[in-house]
Amino acid sequence: MLTIAIAEDNAAEMVGLIEHVNKLGHKLLLTAINGYHLLEQLSKLPTYKLPNILLLDINMPKINGLIVTMYFANKYPSIKIIAVSSHTNDTLIAEVVTEGASAFITKYFLTPNSVVYQNVYGTTNVLELAIEAVQNGQLFIDKLLVNNPSDIKTTLATSTIIENHYSSLKPHKRAFIILNGADLSFKEIAILMHTTENTVKEYSSILCKKFGVKNRYLLTKACFAHCIVKQAVYYDSTMGIKQDW
C-alpha cells in the first residue's frame, strides 16, 4: 500500500480522485486545493511521513503544477509525481516531465464509461497503470495524450541549469527563486520556507543584486529569461496567471 497526496482545485474532480485512490487500496495521506495549500501541508511533515506519490493537477491557483514540480525537485525529490490534467499539449507535457514528473495522464479515467476512454482503455484503470509504472521507475504518458511517449521531447531541467551556471546558489535561495515565480506574497513564501518575512525580503534583495534588477517582478522575469524558472502559461495559453505584487 502506497501513501498518496492529491492537489486538485476542482471539488468534483477531487472527489473522483479520492474514490480512485481508495478503490486501488492506497492510503490517502492528504489533499490540497491548490499548490500553496499542498506545500504548506508538506512543510509540516517529517521526511519519513512524506507521501510516496503526488497526484498533481497542473492548472491550479497560487502555485501551478509546473512550479510545484520544480519545487519538488529541489525540496522533495523522493516523492513521485503523476501529473493529472484536463487540458494540455505536448509542449507542456514535455516541460512537466523535464522538471521531474514521472507520469502525465488525462482526467478521462474519472469518467471511464465515456466513449473516448472506452475506445483506448476499455475497463483498464489508467491511474493504476501510471502508479505501477512510476513505482518501477518507468515514464508513463497517457495514450489519450500521445501514442508514443518517445514523441515527447524533454528539454533541460531548471535544476540542471542552476547546477551548471548558478551552483553558488544555496538551497534556500533556489527555493525562493522558484516560489517567487508563483502568485505569492513575501509573507506566504516565508511561511512555506519556515522563516521570517524580513528574511525572505533579504533573499529577494540579494538575488535582485545578483541578477542586476530592481524588484522581485523583474527578478522573476530575469529568472524566466535565464531558464531557471519556468511558467506554465508560456506552454499552455489556457492557463492564465495573475501576479499581484
Image (tube, helix red, strand yellow):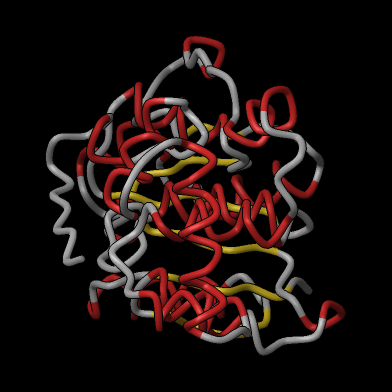
Q: Which of 6 and 46 lies nearest the eye of the viewer?
A: 46
In the image, residue 38 sits, relative to residue 93, either above or below, namely below
- Residue at x 74%, y 66% (from the top left corner): 52
Quick one: quadrant of the C terminus? bottom left
Lateral position of residue 120 relative to residue 174, left or right? left
Residue 231 picture location, percent across and down: 34, 41
In the image, residue 121 sits, relative to residue 84, either above or below, namely above
- Residue at x 68%, y 52% (from the top left corner): 74
In the figure, residue 219 lies in which quadrant?
top left
Q: How many labels, in total? A: 0
Lateral position of residue 23 relative to residue 47, left or right? left
Q: Which of 62 and 169 lies nearest the eye of the viewer?
A: 169
Residue 232 picture location, percent across and down: 31, 41
Q: Which of 211 and 61 lies nearest the eye of the viewer?
A: 211
In the image, residue 20 sits, relative to residue 159, either above or below, namely below
- Residue at x 41%, y 69% (from the top left corner): 35
- Residue at x 79%, y 83% (from the top left corner): 49
Residue 7 picture location, percent across and down: 43, 70
Residue 122 picture location, percent across and down: 40, 42
Quick one: quadrant of the N terminus? bottom right
